[in-house]
Amino acid sequence: MSPAAGGAGGESRLPEPVRPTEVEEVFAGPLFRVEVQRWFDPNRRRDVVRHPGSAAVLVLTGEGNVILVRQLREAVGERLLEAPAGIFDREQEPGHELARRELEEETGYRATRLEHLGTIYTSPGFTDEAIELFLAEAEPGGQPEEGIEMVAMEFGEAVAAVVDGRIRDAKTALAILLARARIT
């Protein structure tokens, strides 16, 4: 099967854009909106979260460590180990600027080099959120954000933490695996 037909590693493309036949906004908050969409059949309903997008940055230090943060994620009721990240909340802010800003705010580290690893959809079954992933070489700078625990981890240990489930945040796991492909 060819990639265009939906084979391994490819995407299935429809011949023309497909749009819902009806869209009703049911919630609008400061960070996202929720729409109820109807598709072709009036009984086919989808709840879709419209999200402004975000950026995440995996820090690699000169000593071969990654700098992660552990913070409470109320939606899952756990303190997760993650790459620093943030939501686009400034008009027309480029992803690399958001990544640099979030890195410094959350960890106090300043990026000396930034490389774009790719852009992913978090969960396209219900949201259009896309996260731009970056790899940064960084050095300590200011103070980390209050309430966030910084964790330095040897890069190989971070890869192992993805494999054994200690790192369960998808953006972080993928950033680590993409970085491993770039630096090995």
Image (cartoon, helix red, strand yellow):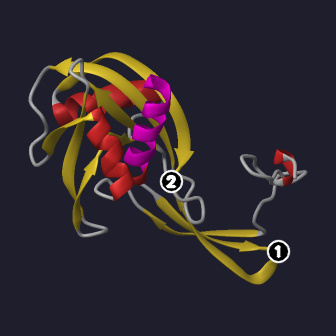
- Specify whether 172 is left or right of 128: left
Tell me, for residue 158, which label it has, or none.
none
Task: State the residue lying farthest toward the bottom.
Answer: 43
Q: Is residue 129 magenta?
A: no
The boundaries of the magenta stretch are: 171-184
Give me the residue at 49% from left, 53% from top.
51
Residue, disc 2:
122
Give me the residue at 18% from left, 33% from top.
107
Res 100 → quadrant: top left
Relative image position of residue 87 (x, y in whole percent): 38, 44
Neighbour class for label 2 at 10 Å: few (<14), some, many (≥20)? some
Give me the residue at 42% from left, 30% from top.
134
Give me the residue at 77% from left, 60% from top.
19
Vertical order, 181 against 23 (above or below): above
Relative image position of residue 69 (x, y in whole percent): 21, 44
Is there any visible trace of residue 83 in the rendered image?
Answer: no
Residue, disc 1:
40
- Specify whether 45 is left or right of 170: right
Relative image position of residue 61 (x, y in whole percent): 24, 23
Point out the image quarter for the C terminus: top left
The three-letter amino acid code for the residue at tag 1 is: Phe
- Specify whether 44 is left or right of 72: right
Q: Could you say which is closer to the camera, residue 180 or residue 28? A: 180
Q: Is residue 175 magenta?
A: yes
Res 89 → quadrant: top left
Please, what secondary structure does the residue beneath circle 1 have?
A: loop
Please, what secondary structure does the residue beneath circle 2 have?
A: loop
Q: Pointer 1 and pointer 2: residues touching (CB < 8 Å)?
A: no
Task: State the residue lying farthest toward the right.
Answer: 15
Q: Earlier in the sequence, mark 1 or mark 2?
A: 1
The three-letter amino acid code for the residue at tag 2 is: Thr
